Amino acid sequence: MPAWYGARALLRTSPSRWFATTAFADTLTGRRLLGSLAEADPVGYAACCDALATYDVRSDLAGITAPTLVVAGSQDVATPVEHAQELAVGIPNAVLEVLDCGHLAAERPQALQAVLTAHLIAFHTGHEKQTPLPERAL
């Protein structure tokens, strides 16, 4: 398959959209993530992009009753923090955590694990109605 065909063609520009620094693309995790993109079925990837382009459920956010953690990357150019803030405000009792990363929190696995673990522990210990934490960059 030619390099210009399908998702493989996105490999040149994806690091700057996915990662806070393009140097992360050269790490083992970065190479694996970009490798998955290169192997994606081009028709399926395009269909996913088309679906996401028109997917808007903001009017339904108030109906979410599950304990919700919204995680954003402080350096995410693909989905800015403002989008995550809109989700967190729209979902009752949602908690927003902003990590120092780009679009993929895989750049900060320990920080992501910490916020996910804290969220799950709070739910498991009966704190179903969470008190939103102040936004902070981890």
Image (cartoon, helix red, strand yellow):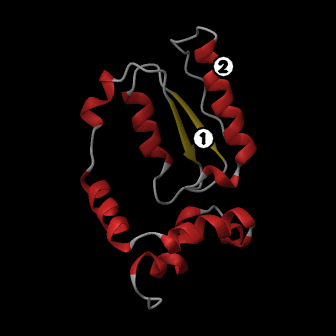
Between the C-alphas of marks 2 and 1, the distance is 19 Å
* Residue closer to the observer: 86 or 65: 65
> On the rendered image, what quadrant is the N terminus found in?
bottom left
Task: Tell me the amino acid under the disc marked 2.
Answer: Ile
The numbered disc on residue 85 is none
> Does 133 sit left or right of 40 as displayed?
right
* Residue closer to the observer: 58 or 8: 8
* Residue closer to the observer: 73 or 14: 14
Image point (43%, 21%), residue name: 66
Above or below for 86 versus 73: above
The numbered disc on residue 121 is 2
Task: Tell me the amino acid under the disc marked 1.
Answer: Val
Percent position of residue 98, x then y: 60, 41
Tell me whether circle 2 and circle 1 mark residues in contact (CB < 8 Å). Answer: no
Image point (27%, 56%), residue name: 51
> Does 46 sit left or right of 74 as displayed?
left
* Residue closer to the observer: 34 or 60: 34
Q: Secondary structure at mark 1?
A: strand
Percent position of residue 36, x then y: 55, 67
Q: Residues within 10 Å of mark 1 (few under 14, many from 20)?
A: many
Which of the 4 image quadrants contains residue 15? bottom right
Residue 104 seen in this snapshot: yes
> Does 4 sit left or right of 99 as displayed?
left
Image point (41%, 35%), residue name: 87
Residue occupied by mark 1: 98
Percent position of residue 108, x then y: 71, 49
Image point (29%, 63%), residue name: 47
